[in-house]
Amino acid sequence: MRGLVKGGATGKIVAELACEYLKKVTVANGIHPADIGELDRICKVPRALIRSEQHLKKVYRHKNDRKASDDDRPRVKRAITGMQPMDCVVMDVHHINVLLRRENGKTGTPKLLGFMDIATRRVWCELVFIETKGGVRNVDVIEAFIAMAQHSAFGLPKTLYCDNGKEYLFADFLDDAMQLLVPNVGEPGKSRVIRALPYNAAAKPIEAWFGHFEQQFLKTCPGYIGDDRMNPKRPAPGKLPTPFTGDFNAFKRVFKGLLKAYEVIPQSGALKGLSPSQSFEAHVRQGWAATVVDPDRLNTVFTKPEARKVRQHGISVGGRRWSCDELDAWFHDTVTVHIPQYHGYNALRLTKPDGSLLGIAHPEEEFAFFDPRGARRSAERNTRRNRALRNADQSAPDIDIGAELVKLAHRAPDVIPNAPRGTITVTQELEHHQALRPEYGEPRSESEDERHRREIAAARDTFIRTIGRN
């Protein structure tokens, strides 16, 4: 019976299967009541006994509905006392249950990219409305994060708390960014990106905020359809809700107004009767200020450095040739290219071996065969290259390598050999076996063929002279 409850069987099924099992083992043990009805009566399992084992349902829930099980896990109450704004920011993506009309006439719902500041309960929001199929991309979350990181009321967080979804892969790059670009934030060497455990929604206050904001604010917006997409909110039986009146930009203005209303309404709990705006104002009065980041510099964080060979003062990336003025004067064999991982790109950051900036490379322009601009462009690049070669020439002295090698040889002391260890001689008896030295006497006589060739050449010369005189 306990195994049936643990397996997820309902009370009726437990009662029936447990009764059948009890009848089978009763008969197997040699008890055979004359009346079949009597066997049913004595083997019936009391409902009170079944209810006493209902706690084993929690085992079934834990194995088959982990989120529901984790919602019931023990919790530790956490206080925000002493926390400063942006000490910890929780980010998440949420589907907004408001129906909007796309440009092609179809309807859809926008996506909300939210960043909650735990200390003040303010939320930085960016909206994305996808005109076609697909979900939120890393580039969407990056752009929202950059917008927050350069805002004076938010800035760069000390700690970022996010999920393990594919749209949060960019957060691995942020860990280095928050340590290297802004070293005065947090403790050096400490990871500032925290990955949430699966099914641990309660650890992310922003998920509770999504539901709160929808139920108290977004439901007042025209086009609200509720959480159940299969059975949306209907103004009348059988009638679908009317989409939001206006385009996506109009909805963003309405959403911004609702978000502002949320920030000025006092909250109980962690804020102790203050509104998010009042809580933030108190920190500002005490001297808090944001640490903001230049968006162009932060964009360079989401890149992967790769070494590329420099050939003819250019590099190849993504099937295209890239160059810049600095590469025309670069004589090293390789250069480090920082290739964006999530954004499309038409410019690449190049760095030297020491990590300093070399330049920004762009795709090389192609010219028609007789286009005079191609010749001018080639001349400009060669001028830069030749100037750099002259500067490199002037940066080092002229040295006669051969003369220096001869001086080196002259300065080297001679090595005086040791006296010969012995001399090898040939015995008298073997002298007649020695090879004879060649003796040079009269030249040998010419062969018959050589004589014929000499006579023919002389006759040819005589014939030519005779013709010349005539």
Image (cartoon, rainbow, N blue to C red):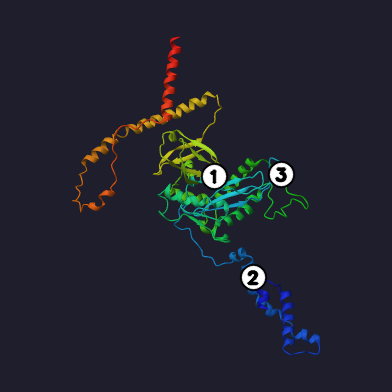
From what the image shows, is residue 214 above or below residue 197?
A: above
Of 385 and 290, nearer the camera is 385
Comes first in the chain, label 3 or label 1: 3
Quarter placement of the C terminus: top left
Q: Which residue matches tag 1?
A: 143
Q: Residue at x 59, y 64 (%)?
A: 71
From what the image shows, is residue 296 above or below residue 204?
A: above
Q: Residue at x 69, y 55 (%)?
A: 228
Q: Secondary structure at mark 3?
A: loop
Q: Secondary structure at mark 2?
A: helix
Give the image location of residue 142, x and y in percent: 54, 46
Q: Amino acid at mark 3?
A: Lys
**What is the distance, in whole Å, between disc 1 and disc 2 at their CAs?**
42 Å
Comes first in the chain, label 2 or label 3: 2
Instruction: Give the number of callouts.
Output: 3
Answer whether labels 3 and 1 touch (C-beta < 8 Å): no
Q: Amino acid at mark 2?
A: Tyr
Q: Secondary structure at mark 1?
A: helix
Residue 150 visible in this rendered orientation of the protein: no
Give the image location of residue 339, x and y in percent: 50, 44
Q: Which residue matches tag 3?
A: 106
Q: Residue at x 45, y 27 (%)?
A: 380
Give the image location of residue 229, x and y in percent: 70, 54
